[in-house]
Each structure stands twice: as structure tokens, then as C-alpha cells.
Image (cartoon, grey):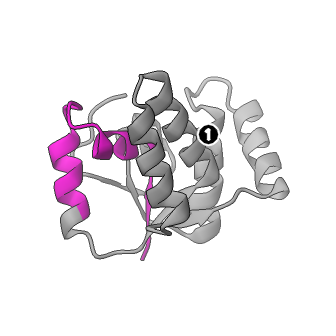
């Protein structure tokens, strides 16, 4: 069973000053399940790091995710973008970002049951176990 990894944990994993850094690093150390992330989450993570002045950490994370194949990267295809658009368009009262919608589509497509995330919106995605067990509110 794979675990989808969201933006917040990627950020926290490489920024020692993040309050969740130690918890995320500890989780990665003991995890033995395959990891999945998406190209949209990578985009969001690397952009967040660079926008916060963490250029070298953005490069290091990009290398880990894209060059060293430390994780399975699911590339969103056109049909999934359209499904995400439908979710985004048809759920205006939800706080889901477009990237959240792409994540939901991938979670449903790949039948993923667990997500490492701090994003409270993932709790609205149905039968999905959120990790770590007590994620903070976004």
C-alpha cells in the first residue's frame, strides 16, 4: 500500500526550522511503504521553498524526487487535469486548491488509502488515513 506525500511534509522534511521537521523526518525513517507524490505537488513544494528563500533546499529536494528516484512520481495526465477541474469547479464552497483536486483524483485513481499531509482538506477526501496521526490545521 502506497502513501501519497503532500507539499507540507516535503517542505518540513528539508527545513530544520519548520516546527514539524523532527516529526516528519522520524516518520520517513520508520516508514516502509512505497511513497507517491505528483508533479503538481513537486511544483508546489519546490516553488514554496524557493519563494521562502530556500533555494539550495529546493534543489536538494528536487534532486531527491526527480534525479534520484527516491519516490514514485505520478505525472498528471490530461484526463486527470480535466477531472480535477471538474472537482474544483463543482465544489466552490470547499477550500480545495487546484493541486488538492489533482491529489484527490490521483488518490482515487491509484486507490491510495494513506496520505502524509498537514492539509486539513485531505480529511474531506473520503476514507483516507492522514499521517502523521495528528496533522496540524493548515
Which residue appears at 53% of the width and 63% of the height?
67
> Residue at point 29% right, 53% down?
131
Q: Secondary structure at mark 1?
A: helix
Q: Residue at x 71, y 34 (%)?
A: 88
Q: Which residue is mark 1?
A: 99
Q: Is residue 127 above or below residue 15?
A: below
Q: Nearer the viewer, residue 89 or 42?
A: 42
Q: Could you say where residue 77 lies in the image, as x and y percent from the top left? A: 78, 58
Residue most extreme to the front? 56
Percent across and percent down for residue 123 are 42, 44
Left or right: 76 in relation to 94: right
Q: In the rendered view, would you say 6 is above or below 52?
A: below
Crowding at mark 1 (Cα within 10 Å: few <14, some 14-19, many 20+): many
Magenta stretch encompasses residue 75:
no
In the image, what residue occupies the spot 42% across and 22% down?
52
The reply, left or right, for residue 131 in relation to residue 110 is: left
Q: Which residues are magenta?
A: 1-28
Can residue 61 be seen here? yes
Looking at the image, residue 6 lies above or below residue 54: below
Q: Position of residue 2 (x, y in %)?
A: 44, 71
Q: Is residue 6 visible?
A: no
Q: Is residue 18 left or right of residue 1?
A: left
Q: Quadrant of the N terminus?
A: bottom left
Quick one: 97 or 47, which is closer to the camera? 47
Total numbered circles: 1
Does the magenta-highlighted stretch encompass residue 6?
A: yes
Which residue occupies the foreground of this view, 10 or 126?
10
The quarter of the picture where the C terminus appears is: top left
- In front of the other: 61 or 34: 61
Amino acid at each position: 500500500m502506497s502513501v501519497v506525500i503532500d507539499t507540507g511534509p516535503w517542505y518540513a522534511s528539508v527545513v530544520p526550522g519548520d516546527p514539524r521537521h523532527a516529526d516528519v523526518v522520524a516518520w520517513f525513517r520508520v516508514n516502509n511503504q512505497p511513497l507517491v507524490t505528483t508533479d503538481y505537488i513537486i511544483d508546489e513544494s519546490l516553488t514554496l521553498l524557493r519563494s521562502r528563500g530556500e533555494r539550495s533546499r529546493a534543489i536538494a529536494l528536487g534532486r531527491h524526487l526527480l534525479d534520484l528516484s527516491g519516490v514514485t512520481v505520478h505525472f498528471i495526465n490530461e484526463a486527470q487535469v480535466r477531472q480535477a477541474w471538474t472537482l474544483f469547479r463543482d465544489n466552490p464552497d470547499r477550500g480545495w486548491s487546484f493541486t488538492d483536486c489533482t491529489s484527490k483524483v490521483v488518490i482515487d485513481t491509484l486507490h491510495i488509502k494513506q496520505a502524509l499531509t498537514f492539509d486539513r482538506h485531505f480529511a474531506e477526501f473520503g476514507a483516507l488515513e492522514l499521517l502523521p496521526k495528528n496533522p496540524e490545521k493548515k
